[in-house]
Amino acid sequence: MNRGLYIATQGMTTQMKKMDIISNNIANVNTAGFKRDDVVTRSFNEELMLKQNDEDKKYMPPRIGTMNFGVTIDNIYTDFTQGSYEKTDNPLDLGIEGDGFFKVMKISEDGKEEIRYTRDGSFTISSNNTLVTKNGEKVLGKNGEITIGTGKEISISEEGMFYVDEELVDEIDIVIFKDNEFLKKEGNNLYIGLDGLEEKEEKVKLLQGFRETGNVNPVKEMVEMITLSRAYETNQKIITTYDTLMSKSANEIGKK
């Protein structure tokens, strides 16, 4: 009886974790360049059940079958499918057409400069006249940070060449990786590279005046959320039923 109680509890825990991920996807539906997360679940390994204390089968207990102990989270992965593009006509808004990332420089809490990656091309100009992200990370070019100076007209080619008043300043550093699975979300739409992350030589196309939208389908996420809610409620009812049965076993059957 207790096994069913544990299975239902594990199911509720798994569904709560999935609900957190879906909620985060929905919350970022309007975040530029956001990539949705998804969950892979798996069942625990099935255990073989044998009949014990059988006098007729003393040396070879007969097999009853197998039993399962519910499901758990196996993996949380990021879907790097490209989103659609929204025209903004802002010369500092850039969209990457293809599988690539902008390279940015983040200052850690202890003052160290650290490389991060992002698909969010909603850039702006800092007080020091350098190109930065919305959160203040420096956007990197092939020669380091991109300094705009006092120029007014900004033009960026499809290859990433950054011009200010028709003068070439730098080339935006866009990196493409062999396997995006070695990227980990850090927050603020940034990714950190894990051990094993390797770059590859491949060309992408930059769209100036466009912004990539997130790849979240809000309708699909809401449907999944409703399904999870119903599954959660079902497990709740199972736990309530087991609680009632155990109460009767202890208070009614146990008295006899």
Image (cartoon, rainbow, N blue to C red):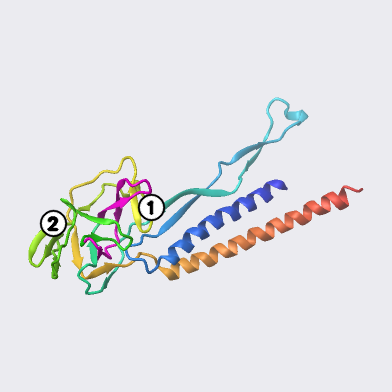
- Give how far across and how far down residue 198 sits, in percent: 26, 43
Extreme-left residue of the structure: 167
Estimate how packed mark 1 is, as few (under 14), some (14 to 19) or many (20 or more) residues with alpha carbons within 10 Å: some
Q: Extreme right residue here?
A: 256
- Secondary element under disc 2, as helix, strand or loop, is strand
Residue 124's image quarter? bottom left
Horizontal side, residue 177 vs residue 69: left or right: left
| Disc number for residue 170 | 2
Tell me: 219 left or right of 240.
Answer: left
Left or right: where 45 falls relative to 36: right
| Residue type, label 1 | Lys
Quick check: is 122 in the magenta stretch?
A: yes
Q: Which of marks 1 and 2 is nearer the N terminus?
A: 2
Q: Give the range drawn in magenta.
A: 100-128
Could you tell whether 24 is left or right of 168 in the image? Answer: right
**Contact flag, marks 1 and 2 (Cβ < 8 Å):** no
Residue indicated by mark 1: 185
Q: In this view, does 196 lie above or below 185?
A: above
At label 2, which amino acid type do we have? Asp
**Pick the front one: 151 or 73:** 151
Which residue: 55% across, 53% down?
14
Q: Where is residue 17 in the image (x, y as percent from the top left)?
A: 53, 55
User: How many numbered callouts?
Assistant: 2
At a point 14% along the width and 70% down the height, the residue shown is 152
Q: In which quarter of the image is residue 34?
A: bottom left
- Where is residue 25 shown, x and y percent of the image? 43, 63
Secondary structure under badge 1? strand
Which is more toward the observer, 227 or 121? 121
